[in-house]
Amino acid sequence: MSAEPQIELVGINKHYGSFHALKNVDLTIPKGAFVALVGPSGCGKSTLLRSLAGLETISGGTMKIAGEQMNGVPPRKRDVAMVFQSYALYPHMTVEQNLTYSLRLKRVPKAEAARAAREVAETTGLTPLLARYPRELSGGQRQRVAMGRAIIRNPKAFLFDEPLSNLDAALRVHMRKEIRALHDRLGATSVYVTHDQIEAMTMADHVVVMRDGVIEQQGSPLELYDTPASKFVAGFIGSPAMNFVPGKVSADGQSVQPDLPGAGSVALGRSVGAGRSVLIGLRPEHLQVGGNGPAVLRLPVSAVESTGSMTYLTLGDDPEIMVVDTGRTSVKAGDTISVSIEPGNVHLFDPATEKAI
Ligand code: ATP
């Protein structure tokens, strides 16, 4: 992320009446980056994207795109392209007319617009569909027209607002790759809003996790997965979600003991405040059934679900602990089993502040 900034947001605030939707958001996006804004419903990610597009008026802060101050600049003069989940295609226009609409508005000569449409159609795989109407297209093809319409404008940034939510699971996975490949081919700068952390993790170079109008943490997908700064990020990134168990650090500060019957202490491989109460974070995929290390938890199995390639075990009830095992297992509901974990995979959080320790 060392390229020059393409988007710079400093101290962005947005109020809807008395509701404070964005609270002093600072964010710098380098040229060529693919950045995902993620967070639960209502965290402000769409508001931030729409503010960038000029569709919302910010209450405070400064906003620059390609070095130019954007505060007060109307949407059509910002030179950014939004791609929505609803596609927003014109139903009475063919694919070609949809693609060239913005050029016609700019009075680009017909032949030039047609050439641009052919080029974009080639890039997006729409060449055989140029004469069709939106109703004659599949969901994935409509999404491609929406992308093509953005590409033809050669914008300074692409802004995506949950563009794949209307598609079925298989097509979503396919379109994720297609959008990322287009981004790379065009050398574009993209900001992508989604509530789907898997989409964010697989598509973006840089993920921004938002909560209640603030940026909770930002970093590469693996930074967020490996070193979440808070319980919130730890629970949001990763699927199934991280397990949290209350516990206590040993008197020598070198190990931690979960506060559950039958649990064993686990070495931390580092020194932490002796005797302090903590929240222990254990990712389902890091818990090993009958692993080599000492057992960290020993609990009854309440459910076994298998997808063929993976087995999901639910242990205990308060809290429920999820374990993901690759491959098959002979474990059955009602069995009591031990699970172990490598010391480097144990996460600790302060129970009061919920920040990582
Ligand atoms: P979602 O994933 O559900 O779209 P989001 O993170 O994109 O959520 P925003 O749409 O940015 O959330 O909304 C942030 C907060 O601002 C929400 O609490 C929402 O209710 C509020 N909000 C959004 N638009 C308005 C509005 N026009 N008037 C009042 N409140 C609004």
Image (cartoon, helix red, strand yellow):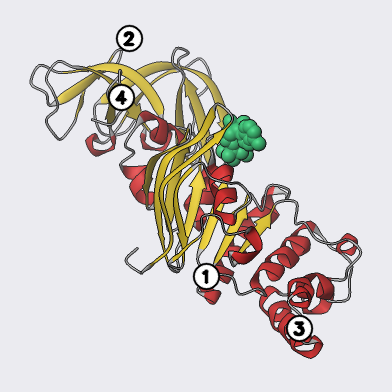
Q: Which mark is residue 113?
A: 3
Residue 90 left/right relative to 180:
right
Looking at the image, the residue that sits furthest to the left is 252
Real-space Cα separation, disc 3 to disc 2, in angstroms: 71 Å
For image coordinates 55% across by 75% down, the residue present is: 186
The answer to whether residue 307 is seen in the rendering is: no
Amino acid carrying label 4: it is Ile
**At x 23% / y 34%, what residue is drawn?**
343
Q: Residues under labels 4 and 2: Cα distance?
A: 15 Å
Q: Is residue 64 left or right of residue 97?
A: left
Q: Earlier in the sequence, mark 4 or mark 2?
A: 2
Residue for badge 4:
280
What is the spatial separation of the Cα atoms under label 4 and label 1, in whole angstroms? 41 Å
Q: Residues within 10 Å of mark 1 (few under 14, many from 20)?
A: many
In space, the residues marked 3 and 4 are separated at their CA atoms by 59 Å
Of circles 4 and 1, the one toward us is 1
The answer to whether residue 182 is left or right of residue 102 is left
Q: Earlier in the sequence, mark 4 or mark 1?
A: 1
Q: Which residue is mark 1?
A: 188
User: Residue 316: x and y, percent?
Assistant: 45, 15
**Residue 67 against residue 8 in the figure, above or below:** below
Q: Secondary structure at mark 3?
A: helix
For discs 3 and 4, the disc positioned in front in the rendered view: 3
What amino acid is at disc 2? Pro
Residue holding disc 2: 261
Please say if the residues under marks 3 and 4 sit with CB atoms less than 8 Å apart.
no
Whether label 3 lies within 8 Å of ligand 1 gets the answer no
Displayed quadrant of residue 259: top left
Q: Earlier in the sequence, mark 3 or mark 2?
A: 3
Outermost residue to the right: 92
Secondary element at image label 1: loop
Question: Which mark, residue 135?
Answer: none
